[in-house]
Image: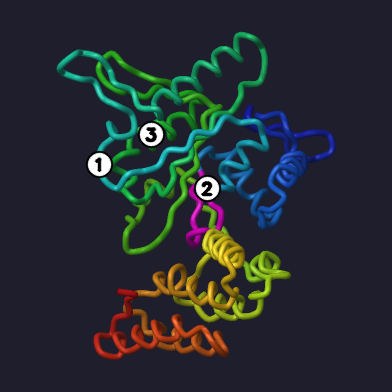
């Protein structure tokens, strides 16, 4: 059994943070009362993070992937670092920094500095005889660039760390950093035409966890709203072709509330939100698109003239070109 996971007399698993699983879930719930997610998902993320140390979170946009990673880090008292991946990243230097040939100095990135801080914390805790605080790196939208290009050194180093406990990562001649057991990684991914797939060596070194977009959670989120029934019908209609999550639902809610404050009826505001937030997600040559757009019209019921007009234009384009697009 690894030194980051021990077994208590009750049989409940404890982790390097010193918290039991039920304590982690309790803290998570206390700190994030509005986060609609099952205990089973928290448990799976917890076990994957504590056993492997590298978790890839996938799922529809707006399902709370980044939120989960940050909320979990807060719940166990870890120090989180959010790193937004740029599509232009093509080498390890984009993430780790570089040795300048002009001034001879190594130019660190916030990411490489965070890795150094985690190593210092590990050493300090070891000398003091205490449990080291965990450091969690969250690579947001990590497949906007090719992971095996900018993350390759870490992939190799993590394999060494899994066998030896600590791995040394070469940054440049004369510059190294240690990957210590208290450093853990999470990456969020969206799967669409703007992203890259993963090589098998990435999957081999990570635990992949897909966040479900459950209807029961959407029902709970919408409960009590005047548009609850119509928006739930629209969500059902578009889920097979263009699912949308809580981020979109939250923005729609704020828009409707703001519209009401200036005297705009919620039906008018919701119609505008269908056009501004929901229909731009419907695109492609999927054979189900026309049927999905027809189901959208049925789900609207009466009213919503802006959305109806836009859907008819999109269906015409699909019939003519075999491709649906908002523009």
Whichever of labels 2 and 3 marks the residue nearer the N terminus, that label is 2
> Badge 2, how many Cα within 10 Å: few under 14, some, many 20+?
many
Q: Nearer the viewer, mark 1 or mark 3?
A: 1
Which residue is the extreme one toward the top?
A: 127
Whichever of labels 2 and 1 marks the residue nearer the N terminus, that label is 2
Which residue is the extreme one toward the left?
A: 102
Q: Secondary structure at mark 2?
A: helix
| Front residue (pair 93, 46) | 93
Query: CA gap, disc 2 to disc 3?
Result: 21 Å
Q: Are marks 1 and 3 in contact (CB under 8 Å)?
A: no
Q: In what quadrant of the picture does the C terminus appear?
A: bottom left
The image's mark for residue 98 is none
Left or right: residue 188 compared with residue 3 = left
Left or right: residue 172 compared with residue 164 = left
Q: Is residue 25 magenta?
A: no
- Residue at the spot x=48%, y=49% of the render? 56
Q: Which residue is mark 1?
A: 90
| Front residue (pair 38, 71) | 71
Tell me where the magenta segment starts and ends, as one range. Answer: 55-65
The image's mark for residue 154 is 3
Regarding residue 268, the answer to whether it shows in the image is: yes
Query: CA gap, disc 1 to disc 3?
Result: 14 Å
Residue 8 is situated, as x and y percent measured from the top left of the image, at 79, 33
Q: Nearer the viewer, mark 2 or mark 1?
A: 2
Q: Secondary structure at mark 1?
A: loop
Left or right: residue 240 compared with residue 231 = left
Residue 215 is situated, as x and y percent measured from the top left of the image, at 64, 71
Q: Which residue is mark 2?
A: 66
């Amino acid at each position: 059994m690894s030194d980051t996971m021990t077994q208590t007399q009750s049989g409940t698993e404890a982790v390097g943070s010193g918290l039991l699983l039920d304590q982690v879930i309790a803290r998570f719930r206390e700190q994030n009362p509005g986060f609609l997610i099952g205990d089973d998902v928290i448990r799976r993320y917890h076990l994957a993070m504590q056993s492997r140390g590298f978790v890839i979170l996938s799922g529809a946009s707006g399902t709370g992937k980044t939120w989960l990673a940050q909320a979990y880090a807060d719940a166990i008292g870890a120090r989180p670092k959010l790193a937004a991946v740029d599509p232009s990243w093509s080498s390890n230097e984009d993430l780790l920094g570089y040795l300048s040939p002009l001034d001879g100095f190594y130019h660190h990135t916030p990411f490489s500095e965070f890795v150094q801080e985690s190593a210092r914390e590990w050493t300090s805790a070891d000398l003091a005889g205490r449990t080291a605080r965990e450091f969690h790196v969250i690579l947001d939208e990590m497949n906007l660039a090719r992971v095996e290009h900018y993350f390759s050194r870490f992939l190799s180093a993590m394999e060494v760390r899994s066998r030896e406990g600590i791995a040394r990562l070469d940054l440049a001649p004369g510059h190294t950093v240690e990957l210590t057991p208290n450093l853990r990684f999470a990456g969020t991914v969206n799967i669409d035409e703007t992203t890259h797939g993963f090589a098998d060596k990435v999957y081999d070194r990570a635990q992949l966890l897909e966040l479900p977009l459950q209807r029961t959670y959407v029902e709970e989120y919408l409960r009590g709203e005047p548009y609850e029934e119509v928006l739930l019908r629209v969500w059902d209609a578009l889920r097979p072709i263009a699912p949308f999550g809580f981020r979109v639902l939250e923005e729609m809610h704020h828009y409707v509330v703001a519209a009401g404050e200036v005297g705009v009826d919620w039906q008018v505001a919701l119609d505008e939100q269908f056009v501004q937030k929901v229909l731009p997600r419907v695109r492609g040559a999927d054979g189900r698109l026309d049927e999905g757009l027809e189901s959208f019209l049925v789900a609207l019921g009466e009213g919503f003239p802006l959305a109806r007009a836009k859907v008819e234009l999109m269906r015409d384009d699909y019939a003519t070109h075999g491709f649906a697009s908002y523009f």
